[in-house]
Image (tube, rainbow, N blue to C red):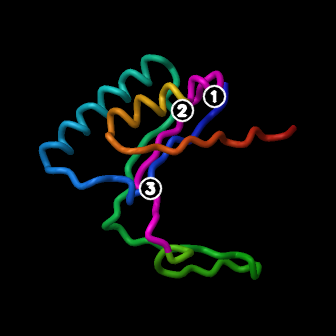
Amino acid sequence: MTEYLIAFNEEWVPDHTVEELQEKAKAVKELVAEMKAAGVFVFTGGLDDAAPVFSVDASSGTPMFTDGPYVESKEYLGGFAVVDVADEEAARLWAGKIAVACGWPQEVRRFRVPKN
C-alpha cells in the first residue's frame, strides 16, 4: 500500500452559506466513514485559520521561531486527508470523492517511500 496526501488550498474554497457548509460537513463525515470501512483512511483534518501560525528555521544549526508563514503567500493549506491505497488509480478515486463531498478542488501527492 502507498500513502497519498489529498489536500486543498484555502483560496480554492468558494464562499458558502452556513447551511451549505453544514451539508458539506455531513457529506465529508459520511465519506470518512466510507474510507474507514474500506480500510484506506489514515487521517483527515481542516486547519484552524484563526489559530496562530509560526515557522521554524534550523538552517543555522539552532531552531529559530518566527510568527507567521515561512513565505508571504495568499495560498495556504486549508485541510487535508491521508489515505493508504494500493495505487494511483485508487488515490484518484478517493480524491474525486473528497472533491465531490467538499465541492472544491483537491491536490494529490504521493508520499516518498523510504529507501532501506
Query: Who comes first in sequence, dot 1 or dot 3?
Result: 3
> What is the secondary structure assignment of the residue under circle 2?
strand
**In this orientation, which residue lies closer to the viewer: 106 or 63?**
106
Mark 1 or mark 2: whose residue is earlier in sequence: 2
Circle 3: element type: strand
The residue wearing badge 2 is 83
Measure the alpha-carbon separation of dots 1 and 3.
21 Å
How many other residues sit within 10 Å of disc 3, few (<14), some (14-19) or many (≥20)? some
Residue 45 horizontal side relative to residue 57, left or right: left
Q: CA distance from mark 1 to mark 2?
A: 11 Å
Going 71% across and 80% down the picture, which residue do you hit? 62
Residue 84 colored in magenta in the image: yes
* Amino acid type shown at disc 3: Asn
Look at mark 1 in the image and give the residue it sits on.
88
Asked whether disc 1 touches disc 2, contact meaning CB atoms under 8 Å apart, the reply is: no
Identify which amino acid the numbered label 2 is placed on.
Answer: Val
> Where is residue 8 drawn, in percent x and y?
45, 50
**Three-letter amino acid code at disc 1?**
Glu
The quadrant of the picture occupied by the N terminus is top right
Q: Residue at x 12, y 44 (%)?
A: 19
| Side (left or right) of 16 relative to 44 | left
Q: Residues within 10 Å of mark 2 (few under 14, many from 20)?
A: many
* Magenta stretch, residue numbers: 73-91
For marks 2 and 3, give the CA distance: 18 Å
State which tag comes first along the sequence, 2 or 3: 3
Residue 11 in magenta stretch: no
Q: Position of residue 61 (x, y in %)?
A: 76, 78
Residue depth check, mark 2 versus mark 3: number of the one nearer the observer: 3
Given residues 11 and 35, the one toward you in this image is 11
Q: Position of residue 54 (x, y in %)?
A: 49, 74
Rendered view: 91 above or below 106: above
